[in-house]
Amino acid sequence: MPPKLAHRIWHRFTQAHVRAYRASGGRIGRNFRGAPVALVDHVGRKSGKRYTSPLMYGKDGESVVLVASFGGAPRDPAWWPNLKANPRTTVQIGSQRRDVVARQATPEEKQRLWPQMVSVYAPYEDYQRKTERDIPVVLLEPAQ
């Protein structure tokens, strides 16, 4: 399948996922391939446009943990540079939305959190082997 066509199909799938999740308060689309899914809002760093990405997540205390894997691609997924540029955002888990601030996990935090995230979604380990970049672990911490 040509990459542009695959991207369009994936984009439409994720848009439908977000609509179903929001409309059902998270009853539909709460899991993907056995992993829990949160809706993460972000603002385009160049466009200023608002986006929502359905992302697999873990928990670390009050923080939501994400992995910016992009399937092991050589570059970060668009949502991560967007959150770095505009870290104050919202996350929805089920029907609950809350304000959060995004930041990259420190190397020590990543060392602790990576195995947890691999237990949430085992392919992360394969994605890291597939790419030369160090896949970021992202924390969404409660906004003050």
Image (cartoon, helix red, strand yellow):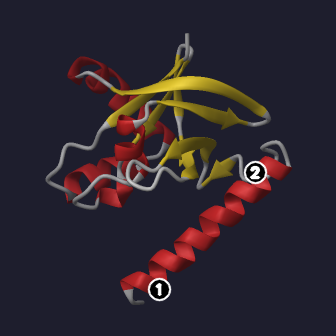
The circle drawn on residue 42 is: none
Pointer 1 residue: 5
23 or 134: which is nearer to us? 23
Does residue 102 appear to the left or right of 40 in the view shown? left
Please determine whether, in this image, residue 133 is positioned above or below residue 115: below
Is 111 on the left or on the right of 140, as rendered? Answer: left
Which quarter of the image is occupied by the N terminus? bottom left
Q: Residue at x 69, y 55 (%)?
A: 18
Q: Quadrant of residue 113?
A: top left
Q: Is residue 132 left or right of residue 28?
A: left
Kindly identify the residue that appears in the image at 21 percent across and 23 percent down. Answer: 107
**Residue at image x 37%, y 56%?**
70
Three-letter amino acid code of the residue under disc 1: Leu
Pointer 2 local density, CA inside 10 Å: few below 14, some 14–19, many at least 20: many
Q: Earlier in the sequence, mark 2 or mark 1?
A: 1
Disc 1 is placed on an element classified as: helix
